[in-house]
């Protein structure tokens, strides 16, 4: 694993020659006429709070995994990526900062729902099931344990919250927001992407327990946007450690969440600084996720 001292860490970008469109928890987005520049920083959020300590390599892992999946699964649906390597012209002054972590993409009209697919029962789905025997109104068999594989993957959309948590919604609510033809298309497309990605990941020792997708429209054409099957948008579990009946280890910020729970943080901003061992363990997990998914080293 590359040591943090040898890695360029970018917590926030500042490109004075470009128009900043906005900053998310992790990504900085710039206007480029009819295109956008999306830059994945090394910021990390936990419990909906952006922490003051960045994770080296995290932004590069998110961008490079997304580019890998967008290319690998392009046969299912067109995506918004124009380039992950061409930082010439007005981007040339910032090429060094963009290398590995920037994507130039087409602008779309984003749909107002997040498309969540669950193949295993975990997280908010597990909590929902314990209370109601269902997830997003989809009835499930009795007696399922935490982390059990579902009989078949299910589509459980949610709202897009600008602050706080997304809210799970039913398919009928999705129809009311985007219309039945689009709702059915994003459901069917999400399930197909998940299935193909899960089959591929399984060959590399990874279980994709669940994931979320975002889509946009260019005219009437549906486009896959945002990020694709990253450790931030998915639960990746190591298959050789899978033991249903409890929470699973994962290839993401688990070390951070465990540390924050251990120190009794109240989950309100500002978040605490992270110790070096937690940072390095989290960095290693992100890198390992990339290397397992793609079959090649990050560098």
Image (spheres, rainbow, N blue to C red):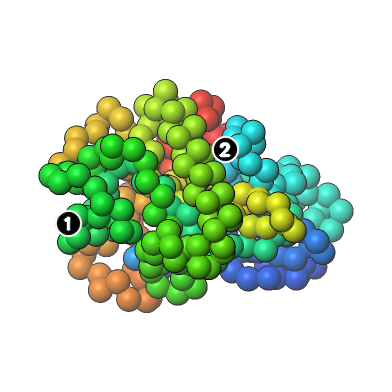
Q: In the rendered image, which residue does mark 1 sit on?
A: 130
In the rendered image, which quarter is residue 93 located in? bottom right
Looking at the image, is 112 positioned above or below residue 275? below
Residue lying farthest to the left in this orientation: 143
Tally the marks.
2
With 280 as the anchor, is 297 left or right in this view? right
The quadrant of the picture occupied by the C terminus is top right
Q: Residue at x 39, y 54 (%)?
A: 156
Classify mark 1: helix, strand or loop: helix
Q: Depth-wise, is mark 1 or mark 2 nearer the camera?
A: 1
Name the one closer to the observer, 16 or 137.
Answer: 137
Classify mark 2: helix, strand or loop: helix
Marks 1/2: CA–CA distance: 33 Å
Q: In the rendered image, which residue does mark 2 sit on?
A: 69
Residue lying farthest to the top in this orientation: 203
Q: Residues within 10 Å of mark 1 (few under 14, many from 20)?
A: some
In the rendered image, residue 247, in percent from the top left (x then y), is placed at: 21, 46
In the rendered image, residue 184, in percent from the top left (x then y), is placed at: 52, 51
Q: Residue at x 59, y 69 (%)?
A: 23
Name the one closer to the observer, 197 or 35.
Answer: 197
Q: Residue at x 47, y 27 (%)?
A: 200
Residue 56 at least partly seen: no
Q: Residues within 10 Å of mark 2 (few under 14, many from 20)?
A: some
């Amino acid at each position: 694993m590359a040591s943090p001292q040898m890695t360029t860490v970018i917590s926030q970008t500042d490109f004075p020659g470009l128009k900043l469109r906005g900053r998310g928890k992790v990504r900085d987005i710039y206007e480029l006429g009819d295109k956008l520049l999306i830059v994945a920083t090394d910021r990390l959020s936990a419990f909906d709070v952006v922490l003051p300590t960045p994770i080296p390599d995290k932004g590069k892992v998110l961008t490079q995994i997304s580019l890998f999946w967008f290319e690998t699964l392009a046969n299912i649906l067109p995506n918004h990526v124009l380039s992950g390597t061409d930082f010439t012209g007005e981007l040339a002054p910032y090429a060094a900062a963009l290398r590995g972590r920037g994507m130039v993409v087409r602008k779309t009209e984003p749909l107002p729902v997040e498309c969540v697919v669950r193949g295993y029962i975990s997280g908010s789905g597990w909590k929902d099931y314990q209370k109601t025997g269902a997830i997003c109104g989809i009835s499930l068999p009795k007696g399922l344990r935490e982390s059990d594989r579902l009989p078949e993957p299910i589509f459980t959309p949610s709202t897009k919250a600008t602050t706080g948590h997304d809210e799970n919604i039913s398919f009928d609510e999705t129809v009311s927001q985007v219309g039945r033809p689009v709702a059915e298309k994003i459901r069917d497309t999400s399930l197909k992407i998940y299935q193909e990605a899960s089959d591929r990941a399984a060959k590399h020792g990874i279980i994709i327990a669940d994931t979320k997708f975002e889509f946009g429209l260019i005219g009437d054409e549906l486009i896959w946007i945002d990020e694709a099957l990253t450790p931030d948008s998915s639960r990746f579990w190591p298959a050789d450690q899978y033991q249903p009946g409890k929470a699973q280890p994962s290839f993401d910020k688990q070390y951070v969440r465990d540390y924050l729970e251990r120190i009794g943080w109240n989950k309100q901003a500002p978040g605490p600084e992270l110790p070096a061992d937690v940072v390095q363990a989290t960095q290693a997990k992100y890198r390992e996720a990339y290397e397992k998914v793609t079959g090649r080293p990050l560098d």
